[in-house]
Image: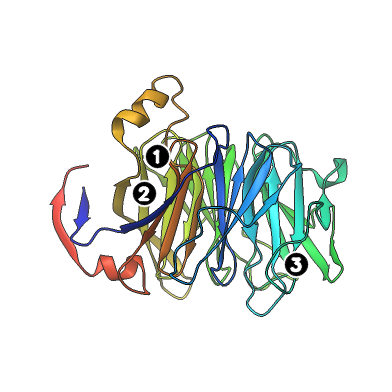
């Protein structure tokens, strides 16, 4: 049984694609939150939206990155004070990286660097994310069920090792479709499309290289999970998840206890993001489609996307985001 919040996340904006063929699959905020990027798979583009003076994003993208091959996810390097790097995961097995200009516009149309080829071990690359406070970028490989890590060697000029410095693989992590890191980089979560679960790994701070433990500290198995697609952590210590095969996002509160930081997971919110009839029209044809897909969190904002809804942006009532809502729980309801 979940609890319904008295103050629900407030929808503040919806960005619609210019054409029906522009299927929004992945989202990412820049480090300052001034730019929201979207991977549009079927048009082979990534679109960048600029935040206006009123706090809302402009309806028309200020930058379009073209010539990609089924882009499925997008991520910005989130280290404040450093040159922003934008990474786009392409399902064909490549990561394209773009470096920002001083104005905040991104160089193009060609990427500054590509991670690809047999040495990259990228296969069906559905998600990408920079490891916070580090010089590493990570990618999901759906068919091999691995997470590959690559070291950023230089930002100017942009250079990244094309062979993974390490790989994470575990039997519980099957067909990972999305990955996300907590703000401090201590936790890595994966959305396991193939087994309807989420696994959370803890970073080994004592390791010389980047390393997330060989065993998950938590495996979330929930009947509400239906082809999980993306995961993201909030500043308040929650895990948000989208389900490509269900018309809702799911939110879990994470509590770390004890000297070994044992992680306790509690479901706290289940929220529909689309009209149910519109969802059923798609889902009745394909049980893996119709639900929310891409996901991004920045401060008190949550952005969710799918081919059916475009991009929906929600705002929580305080800077603590979901933490503020958790303090105002309402009556229990059956979900």
Q: Nearer the viewer, residue 326 or 219?
A: 326
Q: Position of residue 63 (x, y in %)?
A: 66, 55
Does label 1 or label 2 sit earlier along the sequence?
Answer: 1
Please say if 22 is above or below 35: above
Element under disc 1: loop
Secondary structure type for disc 3: loop
Residue 98 x/y as whole percent: 76, 59
Q: Residue furthest bottom?
A: 81
Q: Position of residue 113 (x, y in %)?
A: 83, 56
Task: Give the side of residue 183 with respect to residue 300, left or right.
Answer: right
Is residue 23 in sight in this rendering? yes
Label 3, on which residue?
209
Which colour style is shown?
rainbow
Q: Is residue 236 above or below residue 22?
A: below
Front residue (pair 165, 213) = 165
Residue reaching furthest to the left: 331
> Position of 215 compared to 320: left or right?
right
Residue linked to disc 2: 250
Residue 196 horizontal side relative to residue 119, left or right: left
At horizontal 56% and vertical 47% (from top left) the residue drawn is 26
Residue at 44% in and 45% down? 242
> Can you name the residue that lies furthest to the top here?
285
Q: Is residue 333 left or right of residue 82?
A: left
Q: Is label 2 in contact with label 3 (beta carbons under 8 Å)?
A: no
Q: 10 Å neighbourhood of mark 3: few (<14), some, or many (≥20)?
A: few
| Residue position marked by numbered label 1 in the rendering | 225
Badge 1 vs badge 2, beta-carbon distance below 8 Å: yes
Instruction: Reply above or below: 272 against 162.
Output: above
Q: Calculate the distance from the C-alpha at mark 1 to the C-alpha at mark 3.
A: 33 Å
Mark 2 vs mark 3, CA separation in Å: 33 Å
């Amino acid at each position: 049984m979940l609890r319904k919040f008295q103050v629900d996340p407030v929808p503040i904006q919806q960005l619609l694609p210019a054409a029906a063929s522009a299927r929004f699959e992945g989202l990412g905020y820049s480090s300052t939150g001034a730019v929201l990027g979207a991977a549009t798979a079927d048009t082979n583009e990534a679109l960048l939206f600029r935040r206006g003076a009123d706090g809302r994003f402009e309806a028309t993208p200020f930058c379009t990155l073209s010539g990609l091959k089924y882009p499925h996810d997008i991520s910005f390097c989130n280290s404040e004070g450093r040159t922003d790097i934008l990474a786009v995961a392409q399902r064909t097995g490549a990561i394209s990286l773009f470096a920002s200009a001083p104005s905040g516009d991104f160089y193009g149309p060609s990427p500054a660097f590509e991670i690809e080829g047999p040495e990259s071990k990228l296969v069906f690359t559905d998600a990408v994310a920079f490891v916070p406070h580090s010089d590493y970028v990570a990618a999901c490989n759906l068919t091999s069920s691995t997470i590959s890590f690559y070291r950023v060697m230089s930002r100017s000029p942009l250079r990244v090792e094309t062979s993974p410095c390490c790989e994470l693989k575990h039997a519980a992590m099957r067909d990972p479709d999305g990955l996300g890191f907590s703000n401090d980089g201590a936790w890595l979560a994966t959305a396991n499309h193939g087994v309807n679960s989420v696994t959370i790994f803890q970073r080994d701070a004592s390791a010389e290289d980047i390393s997330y433990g060989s065993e998950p500290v938590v495996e979330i198995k929930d009947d509400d999970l239906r082809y999980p697609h993306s995961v993201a952590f909030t500043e308040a210590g929650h895990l948000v998840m989208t389900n490509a095969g269900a018309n809702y996002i799911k939110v879990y509160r994470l509590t770390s206890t004890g000297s070994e930081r044992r992680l306790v997971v509690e479901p706290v919110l289940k929220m529909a993001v689309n009209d149910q009839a519109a969802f059923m029209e798609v889902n009745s044809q394909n049980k893996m489609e119709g639900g929310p897909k891409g996901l991004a969190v920045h401060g008190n904002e949550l952005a969710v996307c799918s081919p059916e809804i475009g991009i929906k942006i929600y705002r929580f009532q305080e800077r603590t985001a979901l933490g503020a809502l958790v303090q105002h729980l309402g009556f229990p309801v059956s979900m």
